[in-house]
Image (cartoon, helix red, strand yellow):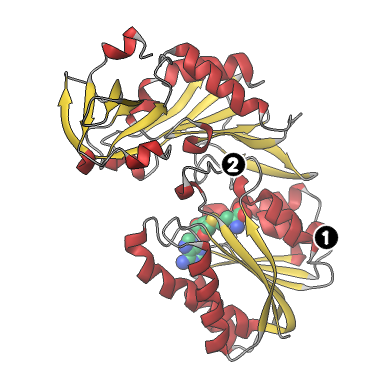
Amino acid sequence: MVDPNISRLPKLILKPGREKSLLRRHPWIFSGAVQRVEGDPQPGETVAILAHDDEFLASAAWSPASQIAARVWSFDPAERIDAGFFERRIRAAIKARPATTGAGAMRLINAESDGLPGLVVDRYGRVAVLQATSAGAAVWKRAIADALLAQASVDRIYERSDSDVMELEGLAPSTGWLHGGGATRLQIEECGLRFIVDIARGHKTGFYLDQRENRDFVGRLAAGREVLNCFGYTGGFAVHALAHAAVSVLSIESSAEAIALAAENVALNGFAADKAQWLEADVFRQLRELRDAQRLFDLIVLDPPKFAPTPATAERAARGYKDINLLAFKLLRPGGLLATFSCSGGISRDLFQKIVAGAAVDAGVDAVILRRFEAAADHPVSLHFPEGEYLKGLLCRKGL
Ligand code: SAH
């Protein structure tokens, strides 16, 4: 039964055959799939998505400026999209996560994979940082903030809707306190370690929470090893490595601001400053200099930014990944470990493995995979939305 409120919504009628992805519960409707629009929906407004024969498929948020013309809120014809809908989805997402206490940090809402396209919410202790990057999420921001205050054990909410993708949605950036106020430098805890997170100026919502479990795992391998930490940001992998008795950690990072925070994070955890060195440099260049200086390491971390946001940019990105992985294999001592990551949505897990294999071949070394990495468990991936699986990584040993 189609709810009478849904039959009153503006409508997007799809071209014949273009309902297939929705029938597989994929939440995006591309503009090329739309035959016509009935009514005069405003950006972010809820529309009914109908197949060419008028069959109801989903209710969705209209994004007229984007190639993704609509994003599905619900496939249920009886479900109204109102404040109660956001309360229910947010409650379900929070319930699916382990409870955090004190200064614990975690992702509470992982966008499409939690049934809330375009919405990311990270929790840093009692502060939630919200990122609304789709027209629909932006329109419902207030209701979302109210639901978080009621259910997420937070008392302040900061908005960081300033991602590049917003331009594609025709949205202006929007940042600042949505509820409460105060300091935007927060102290959080991760696996018993302390970090300062700058929610106003840091990348994304301030911290790369998706790498939490991988930092813990890789950190534990660092005992007695000389570590090279590439793309170090605010010292996540460096602090974990020092906590597990690395001999030394040399980090390469291009942002001076991130390095300053990284040095603070090392001190905050009581580690000697002389064990952690920072090079403000370009990783591509610096790895060559280290190679030319014949430096060698026992554990290398490569955690670069997204080289390929989309499949169209994959080829150029693949060359970048191959380059740094090849250099890393050369800079490892025999038996040394490489923890190598890609957070590019445009590079599949298979392709990434092929690139790393090609790098080992060109470096002239044998290598084996000891482990595969993915995003931490508070970053679920919807089975219907494979695009949500962006982070992949390999732990390789140099030599057989
Ligand atoms: N490993 C980090 C996250 C890394 S994010 C953590 O666990 O917290 C990627 C980092 O690479 C960013 O801090 C960015 O400033 C830096 N970066 C991007 N391009 C770079 C380059 N060419 N050389 C050095 N650093 C770079």
Q: Are marks 2 and 1 in contact (CB under 8 Å)?
A: no
The answer to whether residue 313 shows anywhere in this view is: yes
User: Residue 182 is drawn in which quadrant?
Assistant: top right
Find the distance from the CA under tag 2 to the CA under tag 1. 28 Å
- Is 283 positioned to the left or the right of 71 in the image? right
Q: Residue 105's x, y, as percent?
A: 67, 37
User: In the depicted view, which residue is nearer to us: 197 or 357?
Assistant: 357
Residue 380: assigned label = 2
Q: Residue at x 26, y 39 (%)?
A: 66
Q: Residue at x 73, y 79 (%)?
A: 336
- Is 316 positioned to the left or the right of 279 in the image? left
Q: Residues within 10 Å of mark 2 (few under 14, many from 20)?
A: many
Badge 2 or badge 1: first in the primary sequence: 1
Q: Residue 277's x, y, as percent?
A: 67, 67
Residue 244: assigned label = 1
User: In the depicted view, which residue is nearer to us: 45 or 231?
Assistant: 45
User: Residue 191 is drawn in which quadrant?
Assistant: top right
User: Residue 75 is drawn in which quadrant?
Assistant: top left
User: In the depicted view, which residue is nearer to us: 308 or 351?
Assistant: 351
Q: Kindly state the secondary structure of the residue where label 1 is placed.
A: loop
Q: Amino acid at mark 1?
A: His
User: In the depicted view, which residue is nearer to us: 115 or 142?
Assistant: 115
